[in-house]
Image (cartoon, rainbow, N blue to C red):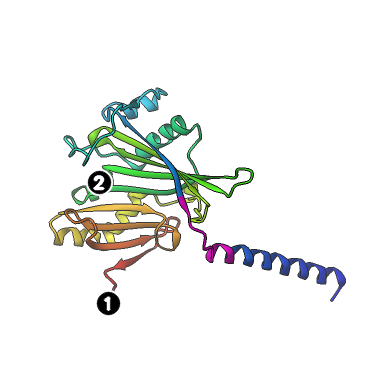
Amino acid sequence: MTKQVRQWLVFLTLIGIAAGVILSCRVYDDRIELEKDSVWQYYSIDSDTILESLTQGNTDVFTPLAATPEGELPAPQNLVHWSEDDFFLVAKTVHEQSWGESLGDQNLYRMLFRTDCVNAERGIFSEAEIDSFKVIQTEGEEETRIEHWINIMPSIDLVYTVEVAYQPNVNYKEPIALSQYQVNASEALQIAENNGGSAIRAEVGNDCEISVLTPGSDDRGWRILYQNKAARYYLLFEIAVDPQTGEYKVLYPKPK
């Protein structure tokens, strides 16, 4: 074995050791992560005109609410259903206005789209939650993770945002490379429908709601949940969909 080859192997070994140390530190990190502070902001929107306004370049579409809504949010008066792209357009705009930063692959870590079961075949959604993050290092302090949450509910003309800081940064987040998703939320929903979802809906007479979220199992891909409408935590059906190939796996109920 030549001296150059030996040096290369030693270098690779050291890289492996360093990576292992970093990984083990994250896995066995026993520090306690604390929420430092949070800022909530509610906005009213006009769901009838906001998409057209944003498409035309008019971003003055969010009216801050002076008072924070108390108690439960009002029931929808007019059901509004948008596509994934519609929700993302609103989210990108309010994200940049609220925090002066773009929303994309570098900081997006979670998305959820929700719809009633009766609208499953249409591939449209009634509300969405889109979350992002960034990590900052202040001299002399531990890393701080700042999360930005955006909730969009067009059926009640409401958008609200949350900025919350955590320190130390223990709960590591991985960005979603959304640009690599060949299967979007609506297509993932249709895959779920064609492979058990529609049958489940029929069994309960569409008295259910559906959540399409990412990342799913193993921190990747789409996860589609069919749940009882009155008791959201009562799971009826769950399926995972690969965002690049469209391959699926039924997670609940377990196939016999």
Q: Nearer the viewer, mark 2 or mark 1?
A: 1
Q: Quadrant of the C terminus?
A: bottom left
Q: Is residue 240 above or below residue 105?
A: below
The residue singled out by tag 1 in the image is 256
Q: Which residues are magenta?
A: 24-34
Amino acid on which the number 2 mark rests in the picture: Arg
Please state if 246 lies on the left or on the right of 48 as rendered.
right
Circle number at residue 122: 2
Q: Position of residue 103 (x, y in %)?
A: 48, 39
Is label 2 in a helix, a strand or a loop?
A: helix
Q: Is residue 117 above or below residue 62?
A: below
Please state if 70 lies on the left or on the right of 113 as rendered.
left
Disc nearer the start of the sequence (2/1): 2
Examine the image and state in which quarter residue 243 appears. Answer: bottom left
Crowd band around label 2 with a 10 angstrom C-alpha radius: few (<14), some (14–19), many (20+): few
Q: CA distance from mark 2 to mark 1?
A: 30 Å
Is label 1 in a helix, a strand or a loop?
A: loop
Residue at x 28% of width, y 48% of height = 114
Residue at x 84% of width, y 76% of height = 1
Does the CB distance between marks 2 and 1 fall below 8 Å?
no
Residue at x 30% of width, y 26% of height = 66
Amino acid on which the number 1 mark rests in the picture: Lys
Q: Nearer the viewer, residue 123 or 156?
A: 156
